[in-house]
Image (tube, rainbow, N blue to C red):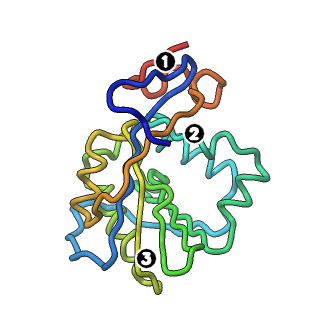
Amino acid sequence: MILPDGYSDVPAGKIAAVVTHLEMTAPPARRDDPPGAWTLRKVDTPALPWYRDIFRRVGEDWLWFSRARMNDTELAAVIRAPGIEVYALVADGRDEGLLELDFREPGQCELTYFGVTAPLIGTGAARFLMNRALERAWSRDVRRVWVHTCTFDHPSAVAFYQRSGFRPFRRQIEIADDPRLDGTAPRDAAKHVPIIE
């Protein structure tokens, strides 16, 4: 679908975001870890309540909703699939970040989900998590690592990914039902995205 130049209406009850896809085709220069007492924990066979909790705490303000709309069977099939790796960023003994890597496509790794909880934004925890993500992604036989973000995400997300060595290669418009209107997310989530009913 090609959108015309200018404005296009988004129907009431929907949300629209500009999605930016970014990639790297060689390991980037390693960036130093910021000072902090974070660790990374691999989560083998993630428990569904644990995954739903960390997904919500990291992504609710950015309107992460795709996994929140899945039933238990669908979610388990995705996050426990061969080729999927799930990690938690641990701060002060508590899981405060989510990293999910998808190696299912040969020669590629997608950073499917990446983020830290609100109290850790701006502390360097995301830089620490990205360093671990890239180490793990490039430890496999891959030729490409990629990620996507959108305009609902933190305003510095694209710049952060570019500083990490990713380069933008594609842009899309995503239109979806507003998750705050069907109870998938609380009505007060993502205050930077207005609700239009």
Of the two numbered discs 3 and 2 on the same chain, state the one appearing first in sequence.
Answer: 2
| Label 3 crowd (10 A; few <14 / some 14-19 / many >=20) | few
Question: Percent position (x, y) of residue 143?
Answer: 41, 81
Residue 70, quarter of picture: top right
User: In the rendered image of this protein, does residue 102 appear above or below residue 59?
Assistant: below
Point out residue 46 in the picture as x, y percentages from the top left corner: 65, 61
Q: What is the quadrant of residue 47 in the picture?
A: bottom right
Q: At x 55% / y 73%, what residue is drawn? A: 103
In depth, the one of 95 and 26 nearer the eye is 26
* Outermost residue to the right: 73
Task: Look at discs 3 and 2 and give the one toward the viewer.
Answer: 2
State if disc 1 and disc 3 touch (CB < 8 Å).
no
Q: Residue at x 33, y 70 (%)?
A: 24
Q: Amino acid at mark 2?
A: Phe
First of labels 3, 1 by sequence position: 3
Question: Which residue position holds label 2?
Answer: 65
Q: Residue at x 44, y 55 (%)?
A: 114
Name the residue tied to disc 1. Answer: 195
Q: Amino acid at mark 1?
A: Ile
Which residue does the numbered mark 3 point to in the structure image?
A: 136
Q: Give the quadrant of residue 183.
A: top right
